[in-house]
Image: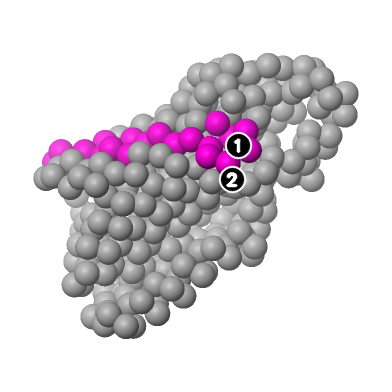
Amino acid sequence: MLKPRNSLLTVSALMAVLLSAPAFCAGPEDFEVWSRTSEASELDFTIEPPDLDAARDDWFVRIGVIGGMAPEFLGSDDFKPSWSPRLKVVWRDRLFINDRTAGVNLVRAGMLGMGGFIRYEGGRSEDNPGLDGMGDIDRTASAGVFLNMRHEGLRFKSSVRQDVLGQGQGLLAQVAVETKVPWVEPWFSLQVGTTWANAKHLGTFFGVDALQSLNAGLRRYDAGSGFRDVSVTLSSGYRLTDQWAVNGQAQYLRLLGEAADSPLVEDQGDANQYVVGMGVSYTFE
């Protein structure tokens, strides 16, 4: 059981780890390597089975680490190993920190959950192969809202978030449907999702302006708004003890429309994106 004083110390230490994570994650300014493997959980900010069995009193705290392989950036056909810390803190199923996201559940009514959040957004470095001359995309913070619903074995998850620091990352809307195999251990879940992005976001990450065309030797390309991708994610986990668990995820993501037609993808990258990862976590009691 987490004592109040110990809880505050623990959460403070974990928040320090979260805020320092970008400094020691491999390639944090590139494609958000582990957002792809953690997106399933990040779209759902509340405690859900099997987490319910581990929740005690006011606090739910879990830390962990995940590693594996992911594209150098979204649209790249080069892959690299990477690792990242994981963090989930929930207070009274109301306030939460979930990896790069922090927020509040404003509505908890049966199978429905609604709330707001802020999120750290990674950028992209032109040091990546295929991006020479494209310039860097700066890190930023986004703010958004989410709506989650659950019905028997199905879970519907959605969120909309907007860059609030004016770094050109625009607006993203995500929708996903997930189902879990009704086994206790190990558990498996299958999620299908899609992402819609506005012209600002797609122009920043997939557009090529006149200067970039000259520097990078790519054709000019103006990207409009539209569906950016569709993805299928398979997740699994096994609890070794009441506190320790191992988990893994594999995701296939297909870039669509304006993103897939970009010269960064069509001419020298790949619209097919793959991410695999395995991790270990510890849940405090």
> Is the stretch drawn in magenta largely helix, strand or loop?
strand
> Label 2 is placed on what type of residue?
Thr
Q: Is residue 266 visible?
A: no
Residue at x 67%, y 44% (from the top left corner): 138
Seen in the picture, residue 268 relative to 101 is either above or below; the reply is above
Q: Are marks 2 and 1 in contact (CB under 8 Å)?
A: yes
Q: Nearer the viewer, residue 50 or 182?
A: 50
Give yes or no for residue 155 being in the magenta stretch: yes
Query: Which image quadrant is residue 213 in?
Result: top right
Check disc 2 and report its element: helix, strand or loop. Answer: strand
Q: Which residue is mark 2?
A: 140
The image shows residue 271 at horizontal and vertical percentages of 60, 28
Measured Cα–Cα span from mark 2 to mark 1: 8 Å
Taking the image as shown, residue 162 lies to the left or right of residue 262, namely left
- The quarter of the rendered structure image containing the C terminus is bottom left
Seen in the picture, residue 68 relative to 117 is either above or below; the reply is below
Q: Earlier in the sequence, mark 2 or mark 1?
A: 2
Q: Which residues are magenta?
A: 146-170
Mark 2 vs mark 1, foreground winner is: 1
Q: Nearer the viewer, residue 86 or 97?
A: 97
Check disc 1 and report its element: helix, strand or loop. Answer: loop
Taking the image as shown, residue 276 lies to the left or right of residue 180, namely right
The image shows residue 64 at horizontal and vertical percentages of 45, 67
Residue 166's label in the rendered image is 1
> Label 1 is placed on what type of residue?
Gly
Residue 137's label in the rendered image is none
Seen in the picture, residue 43 relative to 177 is either above or below; the reply is below
Residue at x 43%, y 63% (from the top left corner): 87
Residue at x 27%, y 49% (from the top left corner): 105
Taking the image as shown, residue 113 lies to the left or right of residue 152, namely right
Query: Which image quadrant is residue 159 in?
Result: top left
